[in-house]
């Protein structure tokens, strides 16, 4: 096999696009499923919860099985699960006695794929030869954002042209992406982060002080990102008084585009900036973004705050991955799996806090977002803790 790791990196880019498709296609179809009577507003929440819980479970279990069966078998399986979930969403509700059961099975399948992708793609790229790991990691994670933008914009356009009844065809079209990439991953070269038996165990990681700081940072990064992103559509609709389709484009689609732009820019020019400081400054900008969105009565300023959050959270997730990998070079699969788990916990908790606080304040979304500015505050404090910890290690 020719050692062309550029092909491996490109396959990983497409892998994150697959994750963007898997996580964001079904929510675009929820209104259609409700109109068919397959789900209600209450049961649709169960689909979202199942997706996140499954990914969290996969994050945790992957520590045990990924190294045993190998990266190649795991990453190919991830794409097959994602493809089966997308195809199942089009087929299973129509052939099973309960359409809702068909949707549950489909979500379970693509969530397994999404969870595996989250654990595997970053360490595969980290193990590839590269002169600037942090820049490469930032560019890599930007492709999840482009995947979100692509699936929201293209799916919205497709259903506008061909009608909402064409959604099954849309599922089959999107399933072609993971099928193609599964074939690519079966052939490209894949390195291991650590040799067999050399990676740190979970017990060793949990005994390391700096590892706990990384877990806090990843949770804060996930909460900062999803706390705003999950509510961006509703925010755009209420601020601009537009339809849901336009709200999806002006809200989460625009948010993802700015997040991807931040990651791409750091990948291009980031070698001139120290990553720790860049993340800390981004955290401060994120606080400002949340404050603008929550406090301003002007819709334009509120949406500017939402956009600023999208841009500022861009570097957080991939940045913490890069620093953690450099600080704990023997962390291996266990490190990346636990970071993904912590990030997913933040992704689950962030929107939940916004929703609960908003509900308690009389469905005041601005108040919920204002309280949730605590997430980027934790991010900044965590970076200060990390810098002090690194200085202590250096002195030793």
Image (spheres, rainbow, N blue to C red):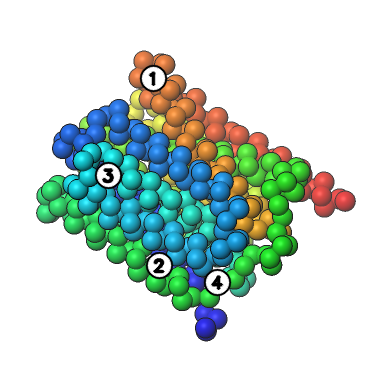
Residue 193 is left or right of residue 97, and the answer is right
Name the residue: 41% across, 31% down: 293
| Sooner in the amino-acid sequence: mark 2 or mark 3 | 3
Return the x and y of residue 39 as percentages of the image width and height.
Answer: 24, 34
User: Which residue is tagged 4?
Assistant: 190
User: Which residue is tagged 2?
Assistant: 182
Crowdedness near tag 1: few (<14), some (14–19) or many (≥20) residues, C-alpha within 10 Å = some
Return the x and y of residue 211 as percentages of the image width and height.
Answer: 70, 45
Name the residue nearer the viewer: 113 or 286. Answer: 113
Residue 240 is left or right of residue 225, and the answer is left
| Sooner in the amino-acid sequence: mark 1 or mark 4 | 4
CA separation, marks 2 and 3?
24 Å
Quadrant assignment, res 178 = bottom left
Kindly identify which numbered label has been placed on residue 359: 1
User: Which residue is tagged 3?
Assistant: 102
Q: Nearer the viewer, mark 1 or mark 4?
A: 4
């Amino acid at each position: 096999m020719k050692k062309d790791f550029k092909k491996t990196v490109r396959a990983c880019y497409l892998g994150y696009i697959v994750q963007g498709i898997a996580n964001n296609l079904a929510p675009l179809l929820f209104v259609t499923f409700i109109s068919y009577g397959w789900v209600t507003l209450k049961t649709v929440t169960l689909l979202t919860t199942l997706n996140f819980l499954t990914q969290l479970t996969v994050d945790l279990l992957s520590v045990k099985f990924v190294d045993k069966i190998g990266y190649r078998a795991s990453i190919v399986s991830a794409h097959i699960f994602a493809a089966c979930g997308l195809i199942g969403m089009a087929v299973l509700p129509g052939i099973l006695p309960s359409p809702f059961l068909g949707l549950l099975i489909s979500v379970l399948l693509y969530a397994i794929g999404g969870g595996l992708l989250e654990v595997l793609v970053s360490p595969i790229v980290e193990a590839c030869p590269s002169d600037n790991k942090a820049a490469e990691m930032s560019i890599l994670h930007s492709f999840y954002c482009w995947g979100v933008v692509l699936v929201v914009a293209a799916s919205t356009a497709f259903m506008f042209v061909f009608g909402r009844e064409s959604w099954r065809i849309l599922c089959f079209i999107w399933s072609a992406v993971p099928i193609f990439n599964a074939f690519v991953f079966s052939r490209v070269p894949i390195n291991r982060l650590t040799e067999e038996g050399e990676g740190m165990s979970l017990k060793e990681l949990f005994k390391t002080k700096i590892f706990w700081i990384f877990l806090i940072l990843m949770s804060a990064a996930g909460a900062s990102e999803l706390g705003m992103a999950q509510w961006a559509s509703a925010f755009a609709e209420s601020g601009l008084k537009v339809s849901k389709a336009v709200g999806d484009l002006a809200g989460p689609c625009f948010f993802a585009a700015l997040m991807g732009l931040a990651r791409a820019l750091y990948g291009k020019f980031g070698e001139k900036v120290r990553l720790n400081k860049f993340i800390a400054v981004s955290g401060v900008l994120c606080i400002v973004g949340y404050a603008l969105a929550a406090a301003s009565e002007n819709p334009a300023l509120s949406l500017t705050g939402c956009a600023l959050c999208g841009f500022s959270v861009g570097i957080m997730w991939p940045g913490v991955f890069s620093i953690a990998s450099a600080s704990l070079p023997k962390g291996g699969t266990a490190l990346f799996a636990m970071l993904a788990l912590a990030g997913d916990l933040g992704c689950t908790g962030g929107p939940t806090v916004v929703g609960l606080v908003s509900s308690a304040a009389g469905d005041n979304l601005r108040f919920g977002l204002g309280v949730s500015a605590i997430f980027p505050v934790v991010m900044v404090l965590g970076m200060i803790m990390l810098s002090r910890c690194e200085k202590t290690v250096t002195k030793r």
